[in-house]
Amino acid sequence: MSNGSPGPGSAPILHRAGLAGALARFSQRSYAADYIALGFLALGWVMIQFMKPFHRMFSLDDKAIMYPFAVHEQVPVLWSVIYAGLIPFLIVMAWSAMVRPGVQKTQVTVLGLLVTLMLTSFLTDLVKNAVGRPRPDLLSRCMPSRGTKDDILVTWTVCTQSDQHILQEGWRSFPSGHSSFSFAGLGYLSLFFCGQMHVLRPRADLGRCLLAFFPLLCALLIAISRLDDYRHDLWDVTCGGLLGLLMSWFSYRRYYPPLRSVDCDTPYDKAEAARLEGFSRLDDEERALSRPLVPRDDYTAGETYQLEEIETSRSP
């Protein structure tokens, strides 16, 4: 017959013996789970690159897709990676070399940047392929065959473009990848500057504010270049920028306190977080164990006093 004591399987996984408990404790005390998830994100992003986008139908008289195809972009893909990915990484490493904040803080900061960039790239390309929205320069890319009617909806099979990369990219307009990537990497750098310099504290000097928000200005200029090249419209760029900002904030706040906090320049302590057992409510036994112990002498004195009162009341 059960005596009400919890079995071995009901104990918290962090307290269990064996491989499962060891892995759980290792995950709580290190960033191994984050690195593994980052690897899966990178693998998923690579797989998306081999998928074709959904091809929305279009008409040849649609003025929104009649813009010319810019052979030379103002900010090519490689330079967008350098501006929003490599430069923030080098800035963080230079800061680490000068300030020497410690291995844990440097690791957390770089890991947050990598998670931001990879998560943003994965979501952006996933949505691009699923939506399949035509770019403003679609007709220049497509080069429709002669005799195609202007006033009817046609499919991508009317295109005569021989370069499949140029053609397939014509249906990857929403959201803007340059905008999301630039606001992700440079937005994360801006949040990092704000935290290290306590920009949101009362009466912060203007110089710190300008330095902290300068990366956002650079991201905005990269996004505007996509409008100038007729690669995207305002809706694509706006949604891409918001996506990048959201991912940068999400990743930064996973490792750092709020910017209005007194300790906003110090990341969360992983060892302290490992002591937490989750969000579940404590049962009766765990509550009893969490209460402070009362010395036995106090219990004895209290019980003796109560017994003496009872004996006195019973005596004639």
Image (spheres, rainbow, N blue to C red):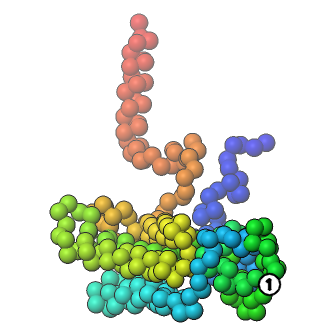
Crowdedness of circle 1 by 10 Å Cα count: few (<14), some, many (20+)? few
Instruction: From the viewer's side, name the closer residue of 117 and 279.
Output: 117
Is residue 192 among the parts visible in the rendering? no
* Residue at which label 1 appears: 146
Instruction: Give the image location of residue 39, x and y in percent.
Output: 63, 81
Q: How many marks are shown on the rendered structure? A: 1
Instruction: From the viewer's side, name the closer residue of 226 and 115.
Output: 226
Q: Quadrant of the N terminus?
A: top right
Q: Residue at position x 48%, y 80% from top?
A: 228
Could you tell whether 257 is left or right of 157 in the image?
left
Instruction: From the viewer's side, name the closer residue of 208 and 314.
Output: 208
Is residue 140 among the parts visible in the rendering? yes
Q: Residue at position x 54%, y 52% from top?
A: 279
Image: 60 above or below 294? below
Q: Residue at position x 43%, y 24% from top?
A: 307
Q: Quadrant of the C terminus?
A: top left
Instruction: Give the image location of residue 148, x and y in percent.
Output: 80, 77
Which residue type does callout 1 highlight? Arg
Mark 1 secondary-structure assignment: loop
Instruction: From the viewer's side, name the closer residue of 268 and 238.
Output: 238
Image: 100 above or below 21? below
Image quarter for residue 152? Answer: bottom right
Could you tell whether 296 is left or right of 156 in the image?
left
Instruction: Give the image location of residue 261, x and y in percent.
Output: 31, 61
Instruction: Give the image location of residue 34, x and y in percent.
Output: 56, 75
Image: 300 above or below 39? above
Image: 280 above or below 72? above
Q: Residue at position x 17%, y 70% from top?
A: 205
